[in-house]
Image (cartoon, rainbow, N blue to C red):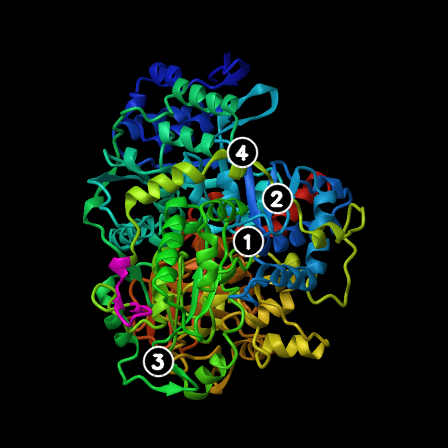
Amino acid sequence: MTAPIRTRLAGRPAVLWGLPEFAEESGFDLGAVPYTGRVLLESLLRAGDDTAAAGLGKRLAAGEEPGLEMPLRPARILVQDYTGIPLLVDLAVLRDRVSEPGRVNPALPVDVVVDHSVQADVAGRPDALARNEALELERNRERYAFLKWAEGAFDGLRVVPPGSGIVHQVNLERLATVVARGRGDVLHPDTVIGTDSHTTMVNGLGVLGWGVGGLEAEALMLGLAQPIRVPALAGVRLTGAVRPGTSPTDVVLALTERLRRENVRGLMLEFTGPAVAALSAPDRCTIANMAPEYGAMSAFFPVDAETLEYLRRTGRTERDTALVAEYCRRQRLLREGDEPRFARVIEFDLGEVGPNLAGPSRPDQRIPLAGLPGSFAALHPAEPRTEGGVTDGDLVIASITSCTSTSNPKAMLAAGLLARRAVQRGLTVPRHVKTSLSPGSRAVTRYLRDAGLLDDLEELGFHVAGYGCMTCNGGSGPLHDGVGDAVDRAGLTVAAVLSGNRNFEARVHAQVRAGYLASPALVVALALVGHVRVDLDRDPLGADADGAPVFLRDLWPHDVELRALEAEFVTPEVFADDPAPQEGWAAVTAPDSAVFAWDENSTYIRPPAYADARPRSGPLVGARALLALGDDVSTDHISPVGAIPADSPAGRHLRERGVRDFNSYGSRRGNHEVMARGTFSNPRLRNRLTGDGDSGGRTLHLPSGERLPVYEAACRYAAEGTPLIVLAGRSYGMGSSRDWAAKGPWLLGVRAVLAESFERIHRANLCAMGILPLLLPASWPELGLSGREEFHLALDAVRETGEARVTAGGTSFTVRADVQSAGEWDVLLAGGTLPYLLGRLRDGEGR
């Protein structure tokens, strides 16, 4: 076992595991190992696994596939409230079921950032922030009291209160240390696992991390390592230079399109090449943020001089920055010209990227500015209709939102400058456009105000609506008065544009069919036009006071201006002060107790039914397909996050209990009764059992053929003792880390999903809920299946062989289990993470 080295770095005692010394002793060239691999090597050395580290180092230095399953113990865990509250509910249930509740306690530091619950109920007016924050506290007081109980009950758990900012931006600006200091002065790379898919954003600072479901995070919190099969480490070699007028959003949308096409699903990407040095740290973080959108596990930028400068710019002390520099240089983790070897290299020329958008329903649907009207016409080819002053193709939401862009000063200053010039020319935003500004931290508001640009944004209706995810996460609130009614009456196809990272169908708003991603400046420009039937290259945004046309090129900021503003106003001082908690948050109280006092009448916090799941065994006989789905089904399709419709099964359930303000599905994730009823209820979900169009959250009960809401059909199957499966196509589970997209189907009785391919996080979440992910050899229609057959799955030897035989109607075929480690099999066959953890805890107590 390699011995730790005791030394001094930045004037302080330090203990570290020497990567250069180990590489020399083991006979491989550390300079040829990708930096991502160096972080993994250090983790293996610190765990005492020299043999695995030597093997991994030699393979990576030779540019080979890793071929290794390893346990990962990150430095810390990062949680947001939509995923964090159900995670803590699960831990509270475990405390109920063991004799020593204190044994259920985080083994790692945990930060819970409350950022998902605030909604843009009020927008486009000066009091929007105050009113939205007041509504947030009023609606979520019970949830927040639970969080305060958890903060007091669990050691090492810190809650960052609402109003502080978006979790990933808070991570960049305040939480990430790049180099972590553990007990006994042990230094090691800052690594993080988060219960949000965009945890990868911090990869832009040289911090390795990725998103997992809450169930995996629970196991990590209780001291278990995360078993990972190290995927191929691919290099994305950046060349050329970003052209003037091209935004960081333009670059990442172009990369998302390209990398989806390159099929980097599940890979660890590392950005390399001569153009990396010219990208600012915020630009890198924008690229890393969208790793889930192009399918990668991580998107790593090694630490370099720009990383160190970012730490200084965001208020880190010189001493801490010096420690990062010395440690990374000492461990050869500081990028200073190394060109590592990769199993695969993808070349990307930044100079080929120009202004663009993505839509209307996926982040990889990149279109040039001139392609916007054609994109909408493909979605709505008929002649535009008008109802109540609203027309097909009108923009009803324009939101500067999301850590993806609001963490990038260049992008935000560009939006402010464009707004200033629009105001100077007398342009205004049409009444039907709901505008909002949701910065990822209060630092953004400070530098926009200091630069004099906040007033211009507000003049166009972009008032600060809150410091949270808001529109990006579906918390967009109602459309302007009369607009939603007009949309429903005529069935209009209307649009939203946001500076976020996802535009899946019905994610932004249930009444909006077309969603476009764009830079903050383009969000402002499209808001001025008021619709998406426009070629921004050729058509004017509007007319000035003299009637002269005003074009986008007339308002577009110059790079020189942006650099000057950033240098003057984006200073360490704007990041220096942590925001004071909201007054309402300080007033929330919670009992001081080791176990949680459940309220049987609560509609927010309930002990979940899946806690007592039984180990799975035997075949699935006489199973039915609850739904038969196509390609690119997202977690938003499976488990919606936004508003709860009053006439839905979840809405009726809440009405029956006297609830008037339903809040959102995301806020109700601590109540499995609501979430089960919301599963597969997305109005844009296309279930082929009910026809080719949107199913509206309905399916067929078989064999009766009766068309029912999915929840009601599942209840009938349960009463009949019929096991359920789901059929799907490629990329099943696109999108977020939400484990409710696996918990919900389990509660409906789904025990296997048969799909052509799974997205990384959702596949793991299925295993963590005891749902077997099975890979079809072809699309299910090509196999001759209609989805209406009875399915028989022979599963007795599936762990030993990795395969199962499926018989359906007159068709028989073999499927492969997409279970990627022994640890995943253990959890899956135990019935899921909670029963698995409970078994381990009881074993430790001697049962």
Around disc 2, counting alpha carbons within 10 Å, would you say few (fewer than 14), some (14 to 19), or many (20 or more)? some
The image quadrant where one finds the C terminus is top right
Q: Position of residue 586 (x, y in %)?
A: 73, 49
Disc nearest the viewer among 3 and 4? 3
Q: Is residue 154 left or right of residue 317?
A: right
Q: Is residue 600 magenta?
A: no
Callout 2, which amino acid? Pro
- Determine the CA span between mark 2 and mark 3: 42 Å
Q: Which mark is residue 75?
A: 4
- Determine the CA span between mark 3 and mark 4: 50 Å
Q: Earlier in the sequence, mark 2 or mark 3?
A: 3
Does residue 129 show up? yes
Q: Quadrant of residue 530?
A: bottom left
Q: Position of residue 215 (x, y in %)?
A: 56, 51
Callout 1, which amino acid? Tyr
Around disc 1, counting alpha carbons within 10 Å, would you say few (fewer than 14), some (14 to 19), or many (20 or more)? many
What residue range appears in magenta? 541-554
**What residue is pinned by disc 2?**
579
Q: Which mark is residue 693?
A: none
Q: Position of residue 578 (x, y in %)?
A: 60, 40
Q: Earlier in the sequence, mark 4 or mark 2?
A: 4
**Numbered disc total:** 4
Q: Is residue 238 left or right of residue 513?
A: left
Does residue 758 show up? no
Position of 779 relative to 404 (above/below) = below
**What residue is pinned by disc 1?**
467
Position of 229 relative to 723 (above/below) = above
